[in-house]
Image (cartoon, rainbow, N blue to C red):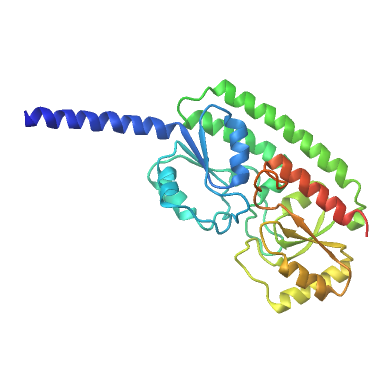
Amino acid sequence: MSRIRALLVAALLVVSGCSAAGASGGSVVVTTNILGDITRRIVGDQAGVTVLMKPNADPHSFGISAQQAAEVEHAGLIVYNGLGLEEGMLRTVQAAERNGVPALAVGERVDPISYAAHGGPDPHFWTDPGRVRAAVPVIADQIVARVSGVDGNVIRANAERYRQELGTLEDTMRRRFAEIPPQRRKLVTNHHVFGYLAQRFGFQVVGAVIPSGTTLASPSASDLKSLADAVRAAGVPAVFADSSQPDRLARVLADQAGVRVRVKSLFSESLSEPGQGAATYLEMMRANTDAIVDGLATP
């Protein structure tokens, strides 16, 4: 009797293991909330999508719970930004990859650029809607290939509809930015985050309050003085601070520049809660476009 009982237990374990594998194989785990929104538009109702980063968080430093780490380990596909963005959880992603979980580093697949100042890879590709448009079929292909139970035709149709919306977004941004005289298309931000937008739409990045691609760095007094001198020389009318980060440093810079400089808020690295202006990627980019035009179109 004990032998029969042991065989039944073993059979149940095999069945439960297969069920867990099937459930995990049908899920997508996404690190950042910006990529999470993009991925959800592609997936639609075809699979579950778990987004690890909460609204208004910092992608450079956000952490995850033990439960979320377990979801990463059992995902059918991990979608992450890469290029050094997710500094707080890169080890978790890498550990899952070593254990055989498929993972897609989207930023590495969309012709990444380097920071002009220090040459490292710039992970902030989403500030260019054209690169996001290029990323959509990359994500869709990996979902179809890696996630069990999805209808590839539906995934690709979702992706194509979203690509059309992104094309409209890019056209709108180009039209709005045309309202800014070329000599005023100069950006000063909290940290280096808008290199891709600058390349796409013809802006000059004068500098950043934090002279780095990560919010984990800190500016020195000499950094602030150098940037204040550059702001004064360029005649920049506005400094842009990330909505999820305190703008104290940007205001210090404005004071040190010795000129009338407004501090404007942008949603640069995180979506917001619904109703706060940037609940989706499309809403975020439209809000940022309005803020940049408002800040720079007139002296």
Residue 256 visible, this angle: yes
Residue 261 lies, in percent from the top left, at 86, 66
* Residue found farthest to the bottom: 221
* Residue found farthest to the left: 1
Instruction: Tell me the quarter of the image containing the N terminus.
Output: top left
Residue 80 lies, in percent from the top left, at 54, 45
* Residue found farthest to the front: 275
**Residue at 58 percent of width and 43 percent of height:** 106
Instruction: Tell me the quarter of the image containing the C terminus.
Output: bottom right
**Residue at 52 percent of width and 28 percent of height:** 144
- With 198 as the anchor, is 111 left or right in this view? left
Number of residue marks = 0
- With 251 as the anchor, is 2 left or right in this view? left
* Frontmost residue, 298 versus 138: 298
- Based on the displayed image, in which of its 4 quarters is residue 62 positioned? bottom right
Is 260 rendered above or below residue 29?
below
**Residue at 67 percent of width and 37 percent of height:** 134
Residue 227 visible, this angle: no
Residue 189 lies, in percent from the top left, at 75, 61
Is 264 rendered above or below residue 17?
below
Residue 204 lies, in percent from the top left, at 82, 57
- With 275 as the anchor, is 96 left or right in this view? left
